[in-house]
Image: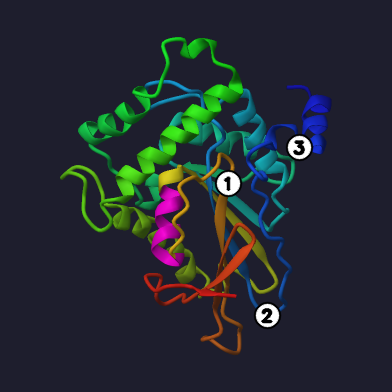
Amino acid sequence: MSAPTFYKRQGLNEWSKDYGYLFEGKKLEREKDRAIIKLTFVRHGEKELTSGSETALTKRGIFEAALLGTKRDKKDTFSINYSPTDRTKLTGEIANLSEKLQGEIKEETLLGVKNDFSKEYLERLLNIKRKMLPDNVSQLSAEEARKIDEEAAILQMQEYFSYGANRPDQGTISPDEMAGKIGTIIRRYVDDLQDHQKYSPYSLHEVLNVTHDFVVASFLRKIIGDSSDSIRPGEGFEVIIKGPKSDDPNSMEMVLVFREQEYKLDPKDLKCSADIM
């Protein structure tokens, strides 16, 4: 895609039809007496409609990934984590090409985070979509394919989230355990912000975590009780952590932002319900 075409589509918002918006995030302002980290968790760009588990990004998905990068504010440090699939890695790599970013990029399993699905349960989820695919799937328009893929994703999430704290089978983590994986990542940065040598006052940082709709939705359901059946490509939430002030070790603040609504979180207890701000 040429630069003029990209910026034309960006200005006209051509590909955000039926999606509301492409995820942009909350702008941050520096604070002189503490560091701030934004942890962004976002679904990968739109993927092709196939019957398999590993699918490529569509042209629109590539555009969404590029736009995700251009909408990030410049920070003192920027890094990207991605789940171990081609579409999440490519989303992160394309976003990272923005001239404002160029950060470190790595697979999230290096953080000690891995979401396990057994082959049997993954097949069960894929069969939900396979039953919805017409014989002429290759002849579908982009809009028709998008509609089927999103309708299938809703049914797949409804199936998975019906298990709550229980595992669908022995080899598949429960929805509550999946939410806990995000909690693990957040707690790591909460701990790191205690170190003023690592994160100096008046600094801004961002970690972009490119993942899947199941992962994003699991945490939102656990923490704020959101029961959305669909997380759109390029959509997500962010957790903004303001480190403790140098003269007050108990002054750390944490806020979750999702669809322009803010929720106050307790840095010491991510299992609790959030307070709407």
Name which of mark 2 and mark 1 comes first in the sequence: 2
Q: Amino acid at mark 2?
A: Asp
Towards the viewer: 138 or 169: 138
Going by the image, does 78 lie left or right of 275? Answer: right
Q: Badge 1 is on which residue? A: 235
Q: Badge 3 is on which residue? A: 13
Helix, strand or loop at label 3? It is loop
Which residue is at a point 74% across and 41% down the rendered structure image? Answer: 99
Q: CA distance from mark 3 to mark 2?
A: 38 Å
Name which of mark 3 and mark 2 comes first in the sequence: 3
Disc ID at residue 215: none
Q: Which residues are magenta?
A: 215-224
User: Looking at the image, is 259 positioned above or below residue 130?
Assistant: below
Dominant secondary structure, magenta: helix
Q: Is residue 76 visible?
A: yes
Place of residue 84 in the rendered image (x, y in percent of width and height, measured from the top left): 40, 36
Which quadrant: the N terminus? top right
Q: Badge 2 is on which residue? A: 33
